[in-house]
Image: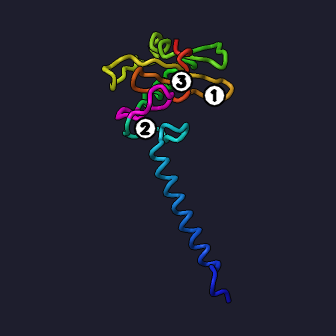
Amino acid sequence: MNNRGWGLSEMLGILLVFAACILVIIIISNENFKGVIPNSNNSSLNVSTKKNYDDHTKEENSVDYTQFEDEMVKGAKEYINDQTDIDSPLVITLNELVKLNYVDSILDPNNNDEECLGYILYSAKEESYKAYLRCPGSYRTIGYEQTLES
């Protein structure tokens, strides 16, 4: 019998406590960085402090900007359904969707109702729509490229 060292049961107990600590850290950091790390948000943004606007990050405000992005995707789907000949990939601007009455203008409630800009990337091959929104001074979708908004 080994009376001076650790046995298997002690080692497994320490590993279990260590694993529980790691799990708690992961859960806490996931909540703190929701919306900053790509694909870490589950369809809504939490109320938090503003992040640096120039870092191309999703900012977490009291307004859920993903609802505006969802409206843009819905309008883009209607636009694509009404088209007969579509090149893919396709960039559909928010201004174009507004002009053709597929969506209403998006006004930023956090910035004196200033008009937001954006675009949707459509891929026919993957049947995917990805909305990118920029509300000056308040919000910018991760990966937003300002050259595509016009």
> In percent of the image, x 45 and y 45: which residue is there?
32
Left or right of 74 in this view: 110: left
Identify which amino acid the numbered label 2 is placed on.
Leu
Q: What residue type is labelled 3?
A: Tyr
* Mark number, residue 39: none
Name the residue carrying label 2. 45
Q: What element carries label 2?
A: loop
Left or right, residue 7 beside residue 50 = right
Q: Where is residue 139 in the image (x, y as percent from the top left)?
A: 43, 27
What's drawn in magenta, residue-wise? 50-64
Dividing the picture into quadrants, the one containing residue 130 is: top right
Rounded to the nearest angstrom, the CA distance separating label 1 from label 2 is 25 Å
Q: Which residue is drawn at 64% across and 78% down?
A: 8
Image quarter (top left, top right, bottom left or bottom right) of the N terminus? bottom right
Residue annotated with mark 1: 127
- The structure residue drawn at horizontal position 47% and vertical position 11%, both measured from the top left corner, is 100
| Residue 1 forms part of the magenta stretch | no
Question: What residue is shown with label 3?
Answer: 144
Q: In which quarter of the image is residue 104?
A: top left
Are discs 3 and 1 less than 8 Å apart at CB?
A: no
Q: Is residue 63 magenta?
A: yes
